[in-house]
Amino acid sequence: MKKDEQERSESGAPIYRYEEYEGELEPPVGFEENIEIISEHIEKHIGSIDFVLHEMKSDIVHIDVHIITPHDFSDVKILITSGMSDLPMNPPEGLEELTHAELMVFLPEDWPLSEDAFEDNDNYWPIGELKFLARFPHVYKTWLWETHTVPNGDPPESFSKNTKLCCSLLLPPITLKEEAWELKIDDNKKICFFAVIPIYEEEMNFKLKHGIDALLEKFDEFNINEIIDIHRKNTCK
């Protein structure tokens, strides 16, 4: 792993760079711990679990993906991880309590979600990105949190051949009620849930230069929300 803590964007945010992970497979231990608790939280505050994509082969943490029909709206499907929070992340000094998270993406209702459909990366990539991001902080002994951006490679490559979206931005899932944003396990452990918003390279660079508030103003201007639209307008081009 290569990590340069002194590199900063023009907005002052730190930039970390990582070499491709080449470690050996490290089987997870005790990954069943939070699955039931997370499932109960999802069913209570977000929606009914249609089915779960169970991971057959895991490294460090066991990442399952829950396919959800939301309680409050019917035009999307929500995909939520469980397993990222099985291990604590490594936040910087002063933020030691921000250690556990799970991730979600919002897909249009007609997005293909079948085993056959997943053989085409045009359909599978949101799941692949969820799994990659959920495992990322544990592989590299680092931290992912609200407003962080992660490019798909360096330089970024499109997630699939049918879109130019190529980076991920983590934000609170503001479409959901705030009760869904956090799950308190005990006095020492709280899981925060973040929406993964696919963005364009120009949007990531704009955020690095001008800060997250400036990018969110762009999103508001063009009515960009959590639901993935592979052909949506690039707000910074």
Image (tube, grey):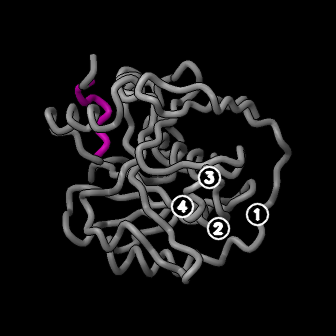
Residue 45: x percent and y percent?
Answer: 32, 76
Question: Residue drawn 64% across and 33% down?
Answer: 5
Q: Secondary structure at mark 1?
A: loop
Question: Residue drawn 77% across and 69% down?
Answer: 29
Amino acid, disc 4: Leu
Q: Secondary structure at mark 3?
A: loop
Q: In the rendered view, would you say 22 is above or below 171?
A: above
Query: For this rendering, which residue is in front, 123 or 205?
Result: 205
Q: Is residue 70 visible?
A: yes
Q: Is residue 113 left or right of residue 85?
A: left
Q: Residues within 10 Å of mark 4 (few under 14, many from 20)?
A: some
Q: State how far apart marks 1 and 4 are (Cα).
A: 22 Å
Contact between marks 2 and 4 (CB within 8 A): the answer is no
Amino acid, disc 1: Pro
Q: Is residue 53 visible?
A: no
**Residue at mark 4:** 98
Q: State how far apart marks 3 and 2 are (Cα).
A: 21 Å
Query: For this rendering, which residue is in front, 173 or 7?
Result: 7
**Residue at mark 2:** 86
Q: Nearer the viewer, mark 2 or mark 4?
A: 4
Q: Nearer the viewer, mark 3 or mark 2?
A: 3
Question: Residue drawn 67% across and 64% down?
Answer: 87
